[in-house]
Image (tube, rainbow, N blue to C red):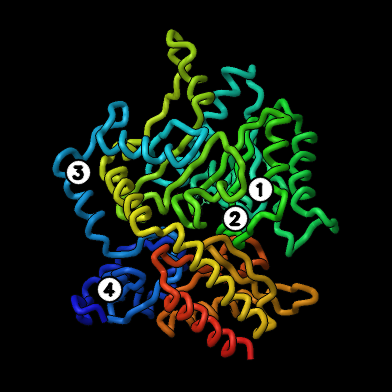
Amino acid sequence: MNSSIQANDLTEVIESDRAHLWHHLMQHKPLETNDPRIIVEGKGMRVWDATGKEHLDAVSGAVWTVNVGYGRESIANAVRDQLIKMNYFAQSAGSIPGSNFAKRLTSKMPGLSRVYYANSGSEANEKVFKMVRQIGHRHHGGKKTKILYRERDYHGTTITCLSAGGQPERNALYGPFTPGFIEVPHCLEYRKQWDVEDYGRRAADAIEEVILREGPDEIGLLCLEPVTAGGGVITPPEGYWDRVQEICRKYDILLHIDEVVCGVGRTGTWFGYQNYGVQPDFVTMAKGVASGYAAISCMVTTEAVFEQFKDAPDDKLSYFRDISTFGGCASGPAAALENMRIIEDEDLLNNTLRMGERMMKNLHGLMDKHRVVGDVRGKGLFCGAELVADRTTKEPAEEKKVQAVVADCMAQGVIIGMTNRSLPGLNNTLCFSPALIATPDDIDQITDAVDKALTRVFS
Ligand SMILES: Cc1ncc(COP(=O)(O)O)c(C=O)c1O
């Protein structure tokens, strides 16, 4: 146990949690008889719960957020100093950290130059959707307002983000949805939809088919995750992104890449899209921007998009009439600046590449040993292992058994994740996204735990 932590008596905390808290993503009935899990402290890659138990966190705060690890005093100090000097002013005015971070961030994103601050990934995505609608109404005579999204991708929790969501289990019972969102097929070759050699090109061609069906004049935006995260850790097949870019240019469709998960280092490059040589018109990011030390999200776009909102200064409907109250919290960019400094000074992009390779090698080792591992996929430190009941038919492993693997790892003191509440019958991929500071020993400890869990659950 971390020396500063004793097994605290948190009886009162647990009782008030049970009496008053509504946890995210959770059925609460079991909490009537079991204690909720309370995480008390974190340092580096590890967290300690209310019983004093130590866990190695292989999912960076459960949802791939704490990229630089727990207990970073320098970020806390940067936030503290900023809060004392100037905590908040609406973003109709600027702030020193807001301006400085926008410059630093766009220096990593050639071709993009304008940053809009908000406070969640969903909200940043909504900004793009609103901008595209406004561009359509003002510059395309009310056309080009429809938005394409991809099966298995996720873009957030609001009704409109769910309207752009390709995960039916997340959407069920929350309709009716916002009109004008249209699905294109996923690109996961392991679950192929076309029997062709050049799968990446074929999967992208499927986007063109939807565009032609709907009418290119109607479509303003294509919104994609660079690597589909919660929908099954889907790394795009060779050739996919080149063709996607070609299609967007051919039909004058803006390309929005949702980097809420992959942004700021997760895949070993600053942004996931930079692995694929693609040039987006919009990039959104949230989780790793400040590693959860402050709430911040960013919508970043081009000068060409920006210009379309200042071309008619006398028209009071022409500019982007949007605000995010907490987009004006100066703690966000203050934390993000220090977060970025840490990634650079500690060479964490390179570490991510090296540790990602080790994680993939270990996962391939598990695939050799356990027939239940049907496929392993990953980019940098965002990796997954898809579990199947039968390798030949690829019948997915039962969700309850996948949950049992996660629970077994938890009992061993290693927190891993799995796709859940995403696609009926396909919640069968284990997820690994340790902090970018992971060491070889951490990676081995994670995959050793999975090895033992697979043996226990599937033999
Ligand atoms: C790819 C992607 N986009 C958007 C979001 C939504 O972000 P937030 O929960 O901050 O609204 C998420 C959340 O997991 C995500 O994975």
Q: Secondary structure at mark 2?
A: loop
User: Residue 82's mark?
Assistant: 3
**Residue at point 61% right, 37% down?**
255
Q: Earlier in the sequence, mark 1 or mark 2?
A: 1
Looking at the image, tell me whether mark 4 or mark 1 is earlier in sequence order: 4
Q: Quadrant of the C terminus?
A: bottom right
SS assignment at label 4: helix
Q: Nearer the viewer, residue 227 or 415?
A: 227
Closer to the chain start, of discs 4 and 2, is 4
Q: Mark 2 and mark 3: span between their CA atoms?
A: 35 Å
According to the image, label 1 marks what residue? 150
Does residue 231 show up?
yes
Residue named by callout 4: 14
Q: Is the CB–ligand 1 distance for label 2 below 8 Å?
A: yes
Q: Residue furthest top?
A: 314
The residue sitting at 18% across, 76% down in the picture is: 4
Question: Mark 4 or mark 3: which comes first in sequence?
Answer: 4
The CA distance from mark 1 to mark 3 is 40 Å
Identify the residue under disc 2.
228
Residues at discs 1 and 2 in contact (Cβ within 8 Å): yes
Residue 318, image x, y percentages: 48, 17
Q: Amino acid at mark 3?
A: Gln
